[in-house]
Amino acid sequence: MPNAETSEGEGSLVVVTARRIRERLIAGDLPPGRKLSEAGLAAELGVSRNTLREVFRLLTSQRLLTYIPNRGVFVAAPHEAAVIDIYRVRLVIQKGAIAATTPGHPALARMREVSDRSQKAGERGDWPLVGTLNLEFHRTMVELCESERLSACFELVLAELRLVFGQVKDTAHLHAPFIELNAALLSALETGRLAEASAQLDSYLIRSERSVLAVISRIRR
Amino acid sequence: MPNAETSEGEGSLVVVTARRIRERLIAGDLPPGRKLSEAGLAAELGVSRNTLREVFRLLTSQRLLTYIPNRGVFVAAPHEAAVIDIYRVRLVIQKGAIAATTPGHPALARMREVSDRSQKAGERGDWPLVGTLNLEFHRTMVELCESERLSACFELVLAELRLVFGQVKDTAHLHAPFIELNAALLSALETGRLAEASAQLDSYLIRSERSVLAVISRIRR
DNA sequence: AAGATTCAGATTGTTGAACAATTAGTATCA
DNA sequence: TGATACTAATTGTTCAACAATCTGAATCTT
């Protein structure tokens, strides 16, 4: 039985290579706007140009790379408009998640777990982990929709956001205020106070969008 | 100035070939489940295997093709679960579109135009056109969100639906009842009666999902 | 006859080299 | 200084090759 997706370094060379590049993208080497030369990267990764071009197609369709015909591929550099767009997606999908919430949904338990871990990480001052868990929290929230496709779409915009976060050295206060907001949102969801959850989501997204926009304009200079 | 996307047959060979295959997919040759052999299709389309593989990556990421490692690519065959998933996406995004509706939004005028053309096509008995315009109507509705990414996501699920419709010979009554429902939905939106629009959307989606599921189970036999 | 095994042929996965088309950088010229 | 021409580098695409894997048919067992 062929194994389509293992958590380890398995899969076809294209899939593995895509994962390798994606990791470097969200880690922040390969900064936004950097050109990726076919020959150069192929040699560096030890794969052929043809294979790498397949990888580029994959990552481009996920908006992590930008294709300019006859000029090459570049690391996507989300601009203001992209951030605004991304937060519109989040608003629509996460409102949908609230509407789809049912008491005792398994995703709620997973959100609780992530929220608690996030709280502890905050107390410890482990801000990189807080950032990861923050995104994880919202990714899990979308599971309330129980829709593979909505989750996939959401995953794409989160990956784009990670591209921005990867640029920030001082992650300290980027995610810090959101520990509380997430906890409040979750508790509203757990107790079925959907209107309140909706309001909490609004304020979360507005504040988050604002801080990402701030990061963008800071970097762009 | 490089031209990324012309409506004509322009663009890189990969893009053009992808479009050619996509057209054949939604037209209904290349039926769901059919295996696409690399060598065969490459020869048929007059492109190299490497180029075709890039195209396959592209169409697979759009869920029009299914990749099975070491076995090849197959035309995607949406099953019941996929249809249910697709209609969850539609519910969430199109509710978002209703929430984003503002009086006099340009998308409303475009929807009106599509709706009117659809009405006339129905009177003429041009059911294939009615089908096209029906999807076009809802695609336009999502433009109310003014989000490139939400539109892209929605476009993907519509393409999947077209894959199903391409299988149906008798398109007569697949889209017929929806002319009225769309008109009612639009008039609610135009006059700002958003709650009513929401109810109209619900009933549209439920009926549409039911008819698509019926098509699926009919084909699968 | 039904089921397991083996094996050859076909298909996918991946590479390397090649060449045309386009772009980028540089030197030249007005 | 600014426009032009030219060369070098990069992308776009193809082809041929070979290893790895799969498919299907023939063979062997029970």
Image (cartoon, coloured by chain):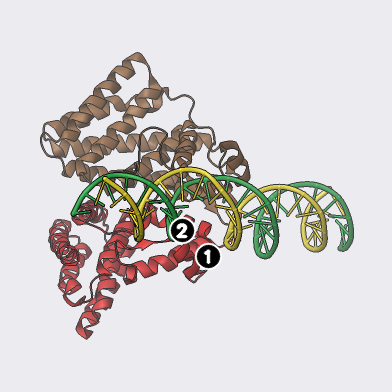
Chain colours: A red, B brown, C yellow, D green
Label located before the other in sequence (2 or 1): 1
Q: Does residue A68 sit above or below A109 in this rendering? A: above
**Rendering quarter of residue B47:** top right
User: Which dot, 2 or 1, sits closer to the camera?
Assistant: 1
| Marks 2 & 1, CB-CB < 8 Å contact | yes
Residue in the image at 50% along x and 32% along y: B28
Q: Which mark is drawn over residue A55?
A: 2
Q: Which mark is drawn over residue A47?
A: 1
Q: What is the chain identity of the residue bearing mark 2? A: A
Q: Does residue D6 sit above or below A167 in this rendering? A: above
Give left or right: position of B188 versus B46: left
Q: Nearer the viewer, residue B172 or B18?
A: B18
Q: Inspect the image, locate mark 1, and give the three-letter code of the amino acid beneath it.
A: Val
Q: Does residue A31 sit above or below C9 in this rendering? A: below
Which quarter of the rendered picture does the N terminus of chain B lie within?
Answer: top left
Circle 2: element type: helix
Image x and y of residue A122, in percent: 21, 80
Q: Inspect the image, locate mark 2, and give the three-letter code of the amino acid beneath it.
A: Val
Residue in the image at 28% along x and 21% along y: B117
